[in-house]
Image (cartoon, rainbow, N blue to C red):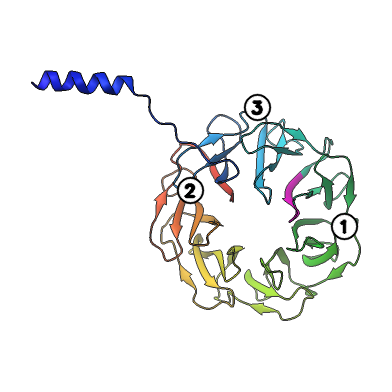
Amino acid sequence: MIVLLLSIVLFFSCDKKPTEVTVPSGEGILFISDREGTYDIFVMNPDGSGQTNLTKSSQWEWNPVWSPEGDMIAFEASEMKNGPPDIWIMDPDGSNLRNLTKNPAHDFSPIWSPDGDIIAFTSNRDGNSEIYTVDGSGSWFINVTNHPGADDHGAWSPDGHSIIFQSKRDGHGEIYRVNREGGDLANLSHHPADDLYPTWSPDGSRILFLSGREGQSDVYTMSPDGSGLINISNNGRFDLEARWSPDGSKVAFTSLINGKPELYVMRADGSQQFQLTYDPASDSQPLWAPDGQSIAFVSDRDGDHNIYRINIDGTGFVQLTSQSDLDYVWDWR
């Protein structure tokens, strides 16, 4: 009887093909991995299933970002690991690759305009870092910042009318704002300490950035005109990687504890700071889920750099990738 049952099970199981898990087009977590030799761009479902290599090339690819509608992915790619990258775009399934910049200089860090028609990026094609914009066909370019000082880490305003960026034109890091054509330049931070990595709140009412004006790196917010400055982390630690939640009500960030980064979440005014991770390993790169209820991040707690997810109340911890390689999370839509 046992042999008969085993034969029946084998007959039907051999006839069935395993169900292939895929990621819906225009959705999922974008990440980079060197599991196939060079850094490629992958996508996966929020539970870690359906991990798919989108680029499958001998190039080195970084910084993948979804377009606002999810119909394209922008990224940077180079023929060599430390070679000069170009800005590329592709369809969500990895097809229809197009090189937009085609320049021997370093073109990197693409960011889509809110309407998805323009990509801002950083380039050293003029001898120093500048913020440029390019259209989706690569037919025109604008040097938006156009200054001998180093300008980088740009971020679009939610209405698409202006770009904030960090600049060393004053000899240290300052936060500037400029319109999308390069006019109406304004220094927003005005402080001798380094003010870095600015990002707009989703509703455009506040700007989040890091500053060393208290002696360590803290998370600050200010109004779009530079007024209303608030140190919202203000915890005496070294705070990094601050990220707005999708609705702008919270901020995730990493904070160094005994030299190791841990993940925190706080309200946008700095109240209710809550430690999400407690591990002797390094937990970093917080990335909000589109619904604002969980965060993906990178940790070396298993000896490799893999991607994990945790709910913002500290529950629901799950490992999403488990390769013996380097995986880094980048964008989630």
Residue drawn 75% across the image and 59% down it: 156
Residue pictured at 63% horizontal, 32% vertical: 55
Say what secondary structure mark 2 lies in. Answer: loop
Q: Is residue 16 magenta?
A: no
Place of residue 198 in the rendered image (x, y in percent of width and height, measured from the top left): 71, 64
Amino acid on which the number 2 mark rests in the picture: Pro
Task: Of the two numbered discs 3 and 2 on the same chain, state the one appearing first in sequence.
Answer: 2
Characterize the magenta stretch by its predominant secondary structure: strand
| Residue in the foreground of this view, choosing between 111 and 125 | 111
The front one of 240 and 55 is 55
Above or below: residue 128 compared with residue 137: below
Element marked by disc 1: loop
Looking at the image, how many numbered discs can be counted on the residues?
Answer: 3
Q: Nearer the viewer, mark 2 or mark 1?
A: 2
For the magenta stretch, what is the residue range?
Answer: 108-115
In depth, the one of 171 and 24 nearer the eye is 24
Sequence order check, earlier mark of 2 and 1 = 2
The spot of residue 87 in percent (x, y) is 76, 40
- Separation of residues labelled 2 and 1 (CA atoms): 37 Å
Q: Which residue is mark 1?
A: 145
Q: Image quarter for residue 232?
A: bottom right
Tell me the residue at 55%/65% (across/down).
Answer: 252
Q: Quadrant of residue 228?
A: bottom right
Q: Earlier in the sequence, mark 3 or mark 1?
A: 3
Taking the image as shown, residue 14 lies to the left or right of residue 167, namely: left
Residue designated by label 2: 46
Position of residue 252 relative to residue 7, above or below, is below
The dot on residue 58 is: 3
Left of 9 or right of it: where is 66?
right
